[in-house]
Image: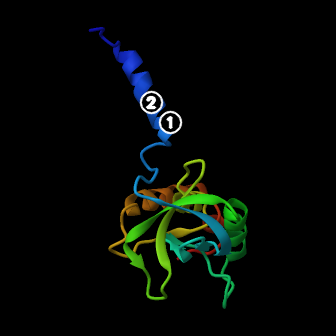
């Protein structure tokens, strides 16, 4: 039997991870098309209906216009409008308004909930039992705040 050099083995593992999109990509996910972006953290998905992104809170644009809400909604529309996405339902699959609670991935493998926070369009909102990515999202918020991204530079944050 031929022995594989450690470097070649490492390259093979990296190639598999890159092809899969990394460890954050959902394995037990559904696929959908974004029918409509309601605001920065709520979308309508084909086959699922209205869905709220788990772990993120973007400023409001409906009812009351909060600082940076329009920018967050515009960003979500540009990134998501009519896109094919993957989603994973949360441990608690629906909120009190009947919306599906989802983690959302773009076709290129990026975790959209994390993108919103990392770019400063949202702050973390952890509501148990949907806590699968809470630590990751909290760290991204700390980094965005330190860098003065989005809401962290445009708005007075408590």
Give the residue at mark 1. Answer: 18
Depth check, front residue: 147 or 41: 41
Q: Are marks 2 and 1 in contact (CB under 8 Å)?
A: yes
Q: Residue at x 53, y 74 (%)?
A: 48
Q: In this rendering, does residue 10 appear at all? A: yes
In the rendered image, the residue lying farthest to the bottom is 63
> Is 2 left or right of 97, judged from the image as shown?
left
Under circle 1, the secondary element is helix
Label 2 environment density (alpha carbons within 10 Å; few <14, some 14–19, many ≥20): few
In the rendered image, the residue lying farthest to the front is 47
Depth check, front residue: 36 or 133: 36
Label 1 environment density (alpha carbons within 10 Å; few <14, some 14–19, many ≥20): few
Q: Residue at x 40, y 57 (%)?
A: 28
Under circle 2, the secondary element is helix
Residue 82, image x, y percentages: 70, 64
> Looking at the image, is 18 positioned above or below residue 140?
above
Q: Tell me which corner region of the image, top left, top right, bottom left or bottom right, holds residue 116.
A: bottom right
Residue 127, image x, y percentages: 38, 76
Depth check, front residue: 153 or 86: 86
Q: What's the distance in space between the residues labelled 2 and 1, CA to CA?
A: 6 Å
């Amino acid at each position: 039997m031929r022995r594989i050099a450690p470097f070649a083995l490492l390259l093979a593992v990296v190639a598999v991870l890159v092809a899969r999109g990394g460890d954050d990509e959902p394995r037990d996910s559904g696929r959908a098309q974004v029918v409509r972006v309601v605001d920065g953290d709520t979308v309508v998905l084909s086959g699922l209906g209205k869905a709220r992104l788990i772990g993120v809170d973007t400023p409001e644009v409906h009812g009351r216009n909060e600082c940076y809400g329009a920018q967050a909604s515009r960003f979500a529309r540009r990134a998501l409008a009519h896109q094919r996405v993957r989603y994973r339902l949360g441990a608690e699959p629906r909120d009190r308004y009947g919306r599906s609670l989802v983690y959302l991935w773009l076709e290129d493998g990026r975790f959209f909930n994390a993108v919103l926070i990392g770019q400063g369009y949202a702050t973390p909102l952890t509501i148990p039992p949907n806590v699968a990515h809470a630590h990751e999202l909290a760290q991204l918020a700390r980094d965005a705040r330190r860098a003065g991204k989005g809401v962290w530079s445009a708005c007075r944050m408590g």
